[in-house]
């Protein structure tokens, strides 16, 4: 028997597993330490009432013979697809229901979409980068090229005509940096992809945090994107579904490669390898896009954005360079005094009992930077900020 030896090229431990282990070891040695976590991007606010009401209603339906649901369509129920079509239409994007595929989250689809592409494709990813983009391609043995995202370009790299790639990962608002592409910047990427017959894999998991109407929340707001892009989105950060699990992927009918429609390929893949998201969860997801659901989730997003502002204001006061925090739940800051990011992690943990994420875990260009999240509660965020200010002031 032969195994896939590409797995041996993947880091032994996922970034957040390493962080969890280090924090657990410190907590064991310091059981009285009051640790505040601003590291992993998990939400803390509960599901909104409109979603809870829909979930309860769906549970009741499953308990009656006349309303019970067994296997559903692998690509999602019509009622959720219609809700998603309406959501996109609000931004002038017209989608066909069969271009929308409901999933158990963006992370799954970002990895699974690679089933459609051969191993000999060259992949272009930003550095720093969400580790899943890299690890899933290493597992398949693809060649990976890195865009140079840095402070000079605001961590928003643009196409280099000299670099040729087949698959391009873009994330906006970005994880981990919180930076957001403009329409003009994304237009450059769409033009590059169409000219080079490449496919953009666009991660829009944080689109609901964009408050400026002049900034794009979907790649399909850009002319030409339907012939070169696939979009992944998640309800995890939009509506607190990290533990409920639901997302969606848009594969346009116009997108094809080697004369083959990728929409048809993805449908075939999903109907073979995926049994769909539970009916109960999809009913909850549909409630997110109701008028009341939208009102409620934007209150929650506003709460997280208030946390982000608390962090951002403190960093401005201290004169610390950062990006993100305005249209994103992430704040990407430069470590003080040229400190390495894992050293800064240890310093904050031991001297401030605050957990963040070392930038080095996101790639070479992440060294010297650090990510904080706004997903704790406001009281803890304020407390953490005071501790961070104390630590930084002592350097």
Image (cartoon, grey):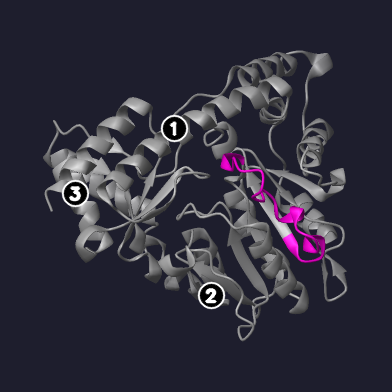
**Label 3: how many residues lie within 10 Å, few (<14), some (14-19) or many (20+)?**
some
Tag 2, which secondary structure? loop
Residue denoted by label 2: 2
Tag 1, which secondary structure? helix
The numbered mark at residue 392 is 3
Q: Quadrant of residue 121?
A: bottom right
Q: Which residues are magenta?
A: 208-229
Judged left or right of residue 276, residue 136 is left
Q: Is residue 150 visible?
A: no
- The residue furthest bottom is 162
Residue 278 percent coordinates (x, y): 69, 33
- Asked whether 290 falls inside the magenta stretch, the response is no
Of labels 2 and 1, earlier in sequence is 2
Residue denoted by label 1: 306
Judged left or right of residue 111, residue 138 is left
Q: Quadrant of the N terminus?
A: bottom right
Q: Is residue 355 visible?
A: yes
Residue at horizontal 39%, vertical 69%? 365
Tag 3, which secondary structure? helix
The answer for how far apart the CA atoms under marks 2 and 3 are is 52 Å
Residue 227 percent coordinates (x, y): 82, 65
**Label 1: how many residues lie within 10 Å, few (<14), some (14-19) or many (20+)?**
some
**Between 183 and 372, which is closer to the camera in this rendering?**
183
**Label 2: how many residues lie within 10 Å, few (<14), some (14-19) or many (20+)?**
few
- Asked whether 210 falls inside the magenta stretch, the response is yes
The answer for how far apart the CA atoms under marks 3 and 1 are is 22 Å
Residue at horizontal 51%, vertical 55%? 179
**Between 338 and 233, which is closer to the camera in this rendering?**
338
Q: Quadrant of residue 124?
A: bottom right
């Amino acid at each position: 028997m032969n195994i896939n030896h590409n797995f041996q090229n993947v880091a032994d431990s996922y970034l957040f597993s390493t962080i969890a282990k280090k924090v657990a070891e410190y907590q064991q040695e310091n059981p009285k330490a009051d640790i505040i976590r601003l590291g992993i991007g998990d939400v803390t606010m509960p599901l909104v009432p409109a979603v809870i009401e829909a979930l309860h209603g769906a549970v009741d339906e499953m308990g009656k013979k006349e309303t019970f649901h067994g296997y559903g369509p692998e690509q999602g129920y019509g009622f959720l697809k219609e809700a998603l079509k309406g959501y996109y239409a609000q931004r002038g994007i017209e989608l066909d229901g069969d271009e929308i595929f409901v999933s158990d989250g963006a992370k799954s689809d970002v990895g699974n979409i690679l089933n459609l592409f051969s191993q000999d494709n060259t992949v272009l990813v930003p550095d720093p980068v969400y580790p899943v983009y890299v690890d899933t391609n290493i597992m398949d043995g693809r060649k990976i090229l890195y865009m140079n995202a840095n402070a000079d370009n605001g961590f928003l790299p643009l196409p280099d005509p000299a670099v040729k790639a087949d698959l391009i990962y873009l994330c906006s608002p970005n994880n981990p940096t919180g930076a957001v592409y403009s329409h003009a910047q994304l237009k450059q990427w769409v033009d590059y992809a169409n000219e080079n017959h490449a496919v953009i894999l666009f991660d829009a998991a944080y689109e609901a945090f964009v408050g400026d109407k002049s900034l794009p929340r979907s790649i399909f707001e850009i002319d030409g994107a339907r012939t070169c892009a696939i979009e992944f989105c998640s309800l995890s950060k939009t509506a607190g579904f990290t533990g409920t699990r639901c997302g969606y992927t848009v594969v346009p009918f116009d997108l094809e490669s080697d004369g083959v429609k990728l929409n048809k390929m993805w449908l075939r893949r999903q109907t073979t390898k995926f049994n769909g998201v539970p009916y109960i969860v999809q009913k909850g997801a549909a409630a997110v896009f109701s008028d009341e659901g939208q009102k409620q989730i934007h209150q929650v997003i506003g709460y997280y954005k208030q946390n982000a502002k608390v962090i951002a204001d403190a960093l401005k006061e201290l004169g610390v360079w950062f990006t993100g925090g305005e249209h994103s739940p992430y704040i990407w800051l430069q470590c003080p005094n040229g400190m390495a990011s894992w050293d800064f992690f240890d310093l904050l943990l031991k001297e401030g009992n605050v957990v963040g994420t070392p930038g080095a875990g996101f790639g070479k260009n992440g060294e010297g930077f650090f990510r904080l999240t706004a997903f704790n509660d406001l009281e803890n965020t304020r407390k953490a900020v005071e501790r961070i200010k104390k630590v930084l002031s002592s350097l």
